[in-house]
Amino acid sequence: MENQYTSCQNEHNKLLKIINFRFQHRYKKIGIIGGALILGFLVIYKFTGGDSLLIKDVLRTIMLLFLLVASLSKDAIEDEYITHVRSQSYVIAFICAIGYSIALPLIAVLFDLLITRITGDGHVSFHEVSAFEVMFMLVCFQLLFFHTIKRFGRAE
Amino acid sequence: MRNRLKVERAELNITQDDLAKKIGVSRQTINSIEKNRYVPSTILALKLSKVFDKNVNELFILEDEDFGTNTQK
């Protein structure tokens, strides 16, 4: 019985270590700047006619990694309020990302229907939300909500 | 739940920043507690009670509505 309790506690401790893991504060800037640079590069690559899927996939993955590092980095003063704000931002981001993946295809279909009805031309297609899109929105929503909720605490 | 943090701080004549430094948190944490936007942990509440030399019960006061929030139906 005691062994079972100890192994349960060990697992809990390991899980807590993973949950509480944070990068140093300086990695936040690196993550955001790196992510923004790659996003800029991806936009330029798209508009200059680049169509290599491999390059796009590699750059997207690296961008997600940069943004994840920014998301997991400590704040300048990391206290319990910041931890609370961070967990709130993850919850809202999770809900928003699911809402996005449900709403976007519906909006696209409605838009197609509208265009088809107005012009009498074209076809209705179903926009499939990719895993990258959902992950990107999730991490962007998290960073956005984290800074927004934190700002509420700063207001007098 | 309401708190008397702002009043106690005024009595000691210290700023949010001073108080934050004393208990090792950020100023926005103190501001959020004062505005009732954030309920501090027991550790933080005890640190605050030590700074103001008051019981936690004197700093944080439960209100009637706090007794009915977690009732399961």
Image (cartoon, coloured by chain):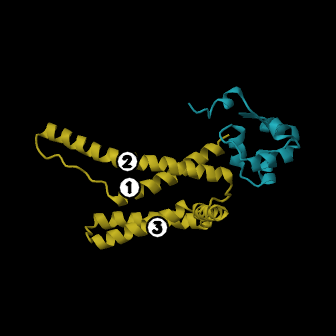
Tell whether A6 sits left or right of B52: left
For the colour yellow, the matching chain is A
Please state the chain letter of the residue tagged with numbered disc 1 in the rendered image: A
Type of the residue with mark 2: Tyr
Q: Kindly identify which numbered label has been placed on residue A134.
A: 1
**B73 or A43: which is nearer to us?**
B73
Tell me which residue sits at (15%, 37%) in the image.
A117
Residue carrying label 2: A100
Dots 3, 1 in contact, CB < 8 A: no
What is the x, y in percent for residue A93?
Answer: 47, 50
A93 versus B12 height, above or below: below
Q: CA distance from mark 1 to mark 2?
A: 8 Å
Dots 1, 2 in contact, CB < 8 A: yes
Type of the residue with mark 1: Val
Residue A68 shows up from this direction:
yes
- For label 3, the SS is helix
Type of the residue with mark 3: Leu
Same chain assignment for discs 3 and 2: yes
| Quadrant, the N terminus of chain B | top right
Residue carrying label 3: A65
Q: CA distance from mark 3 to mark 2?
A: 21 Å
